[in-house]
Amino acid sequence: MRVLIIEDNRQLAANLVDYLEARGIAADFAADGVAGRRLAMAQRFDAIVLDLGLPGMNGMSLCRELRDSGAEVPIIILTARGELDAKLRGLAEGADDYLVKPVPLVELEARIRAQVRRFRGGFARRLSVADLVMDEATMEVRRAGRLLSLTRTDYNLLRVLMRQSPAVVSRRQLEDEVWGERLPESDTLRAHIHRLRRAVDQPSECPLVHTVHGVGYRLAADDT
């Protein structure tokens, strides 16, 4: 299990990291919202522990942005704000749990494990197209047994294509599902598809990622 701690109190963060790693949970750390967003978008985590009063980008905004981007990782807010309104807003922005400091570390660990179990058991599934397999529980993607290295955005694009396979997915639908309201620049999707095609189809002799000119893209073992 791998957890991202986004907390500007470095002493508290160090205590959390030390405790979790002693319990067999790998933990990464970011001290501000911008760095936390960068790590959360670029790497894969089983859970995120998120403070609200962060420099650079506050926790509420970061939680909302992660959810808008399609991230389904469990998010546990850990904050000094115990007001009911703050709790309700945090949950409304997409958090899965809300804890008020100070909290016993053993309870935080239990909450993390419970959220990861819930995610893996209730929402994750295994997708496959030909010899391409995606395990949504571990976020691992393999082609003919070979583990693929994908960015989070490329993973999200591939997941949409695999869920819709063999149907054609329009450019607009892909952009909406992966980027939400913050639509990318005109060539961004094309660049990601190009990188995704290299990761999925090379060096295989059977391409799976196909362009349907003027419409969008499809994932299938044939291009008809």
Image (cartoon, helix red, strand yellow):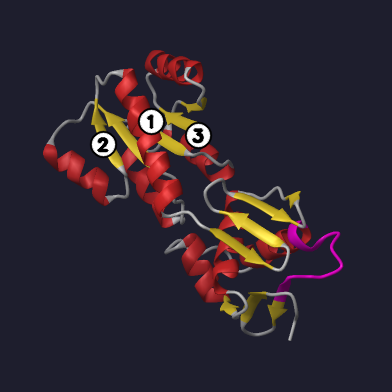
What residue appears at the point 53 percent right and 45 percent down from the top-left corner?
41
Measuring from the top left, give residue 4's x and y in whole percent.
47, 32
Identify the image quadrant of residue 100. top left
Mark 1 to mark 3 CA distance (whole Å): 10 Å
Q: Foreground mark, 1 or 3?
A: 3
What residue appears at the point 37 percent right and 40 percent down from the top-left corner?
115
Query: Which residues, given as a range, are shown in magenta?
Result: 199-210
Identify the image quadrant of residue 53. top left
- Numbered mark located on residue 35 in the image: 3
Residue 48 colored in magenta in the image = no
- Numbered mark located on residue 55 in the image: 1
Q: Is residue 180 left or right of residue 187?
A: left
Label 1 sits on a secondary structure element that is loop
Is residue 185 placed above or below 139 in the rendered structure? below
What residue appears at the point 51 percent right and 57 percent down from the top-left corner?
125
Q: Earlier in the sequence, mark 1 or mark 3?
A: 3
Mark 2 to mark 3 CA distance (whole Å): 21 Å
Identify residue for label 2: 98
- Numbered mark located on residue 121 in the image: none
